[in-house]
Amino acid sequence: MTITDAREHLDDAARDWLDNVHGTGSGPTFEVLDPGTGRILAELSAATESDVNHAVEAARAAFEDGRWSERDADHREEVLLRLAQLVERDFELLVTIEALDTGKPRAEAWYDIKEVIGVLRYYAGWCTKATGTTIPAPRQYFAVTLRGPVGVCAAITPWNYPLPILMYKLAPALAFGNSFIAKPSELAPLSALHFVRLCAEAGVPDDVVTVLTGAGSTGAALAAHPGLDKIAFTGSTRTGRAIAHAAAERPTRVSLELGGKSPNIVFASADLEAAADGVALGIWTNAGQVCVAGSRLLVERSIHDRFVDLLAERTDAMVLGHSLDPEAQIGPMISAAQRTNAENVVASALDDGAVAVTGGRALAGPGFFLEPTMLTGLATDHPVSQEEIFGPVLVVDTFDTEREAVAKGNATAYGLAAGVWTGRAGQGQRMARGLSSGTVWINAYGVFHPTLPFGGTKASGYGRELGESAVEAYTEITTVVEDLSAGEGDDHD
Ligand code: ADP
């Protein structure tokens, strides 16, 4: 099914929504494109430095006057649950907006918005569960910790999972009483603009959640603002470094979830059909534009040819298509620039002797499509085996022993995720101990859940989101110590 103008395929609600969406800044406008056609979906105004200043001041004032930060925890719980209900009410619209804006098939966006609901409900539960402690300091003292909000938190987020990644930050921030400023990616900001409307409808007070539209310069102005208590960033390693630098000028907490070059490691003992399904899912989901993409396949040498064939069968059968095409299994890349970059990477690999077992070419016609491309014959230390491509490109390498699998698994600058496929008891757990990786999936890949802490090691960043980790990330503790001996000896009968 060829779609050249997505608007013709939208229902009235989605078309009206797009006709009435605006940016939140006073600066020049920028275009938001449908990656499946290259056509303009919306034109939004960008937030300037003065808009950023205003947003931070307003968020600070909201925090200080206690309109949210001092509300009872069960009130915040109720509001978060209402927000989850409103996302459910507008589910179809949000799925459509997210799919159109990112280019991913609607079926993938469906899971993303489900995940948003799950994360909101999970942190709604935490509102009343995060507690301080009593501490066995010397008996003379009564010592406790109080747990409160951090203050004004900001999030700078990418375009690949716009609303879920925002929610990993926003839901716990709101749960514990913080004010929150979001700067979504200029390439896919639309779902955040709908969500902020839902916040107001759910009863989040004014200026407690603000969305700033704009590109890198808006993000840079936000990251450099002295009035923030915390910045959570998800995106490229290069931008993460710039943000950490800006924040280092003052005591702003930073958490960074950056890139990856994650290995999917397949042992000969594995259920190879299941492993091939898992490896395909791990790299072709969202056209490989996933921080945890399993973009390096490490396969035990004895099964290399057989496994590559299994994967090639699955890959060749996949249907590329527009986000609104119900048959589509792989969407386009996010932009022309991103696709050109991936094409150049593939060309350099082929020049250096790699073989494209599948794909290798951009599709002619509208949209930024690149065929899913599996490359064999590259050395482990080749730049294409080392650097994050953020596209549908998989590099295949081999190993002979468990020890070598660990060494090659760790042989990049990154440490975000890894998959291990094995039929031998204990082998996955041994691998998990050896791999330097924020997450290790065993006989599975890409499993996310609100309960599971997520984040990276090495160049993949620091800090953990989701699960109980976010309680630490979005609260501050105050240690309170009282001397009990002061009144000792007083007569109290
Ligand atoms: P990606 O390759 O995922 O687009 P980026 O790191 O460029 O990764 O973008 C992620 C987010 O960071 C986006 O919201 C983008 O606008 C923002 N951003 C880009 N450059 C900067 C910067 N110098 N300072 C702060 N934010 C930035």
Image: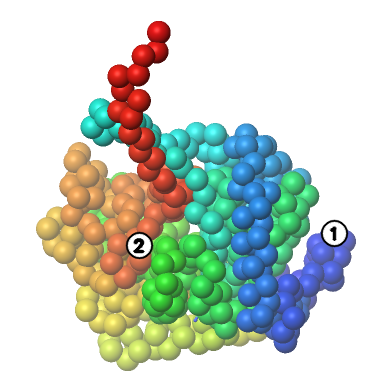
Residue at point 22% right, 53% down?
267
Question: Do we see residue 313 in this rendering?
Answer: no
Q: Residues within 10 Å of mark 2 (few under 14, many from 20)?
A: some
Residue at point 60% right, 79% down?
218
Q: Which numbered disc, 2 or 1, marks the residue that appears first in the sequence? A: 1
Q: Which quadrant holds residue 48?
A: bottom right
Residue at point 36% right, 66% down?
461
Side of 468 where 320 appears, left or right:
right
Residue 109 in the image: above or below residue 28: above
The residue carrying mark 2 is: 462
Q: Residues at badges 2 and 1 in contact (C-beta under 8 Å)?
A: no
The residue carrying mark 1 is: 13
Q: Residues within 10 Å of mark 1 (few under 14, many from 20)?
A: few
Question: Do we see residue 132 in this rendering?
Answer: yes
Helix, strand or loop at label 1? It is helix
Residue 29 in the image: above or below residue 140: below
Helix, strand or loop at label 2? It is strand
Q: Residue 433's x, y, as percent?
A: 20, 50
Q: Which quadrant holds residue 346?
A: bottom left
Q: Which quadrant holds residue 104?
A: bottom right
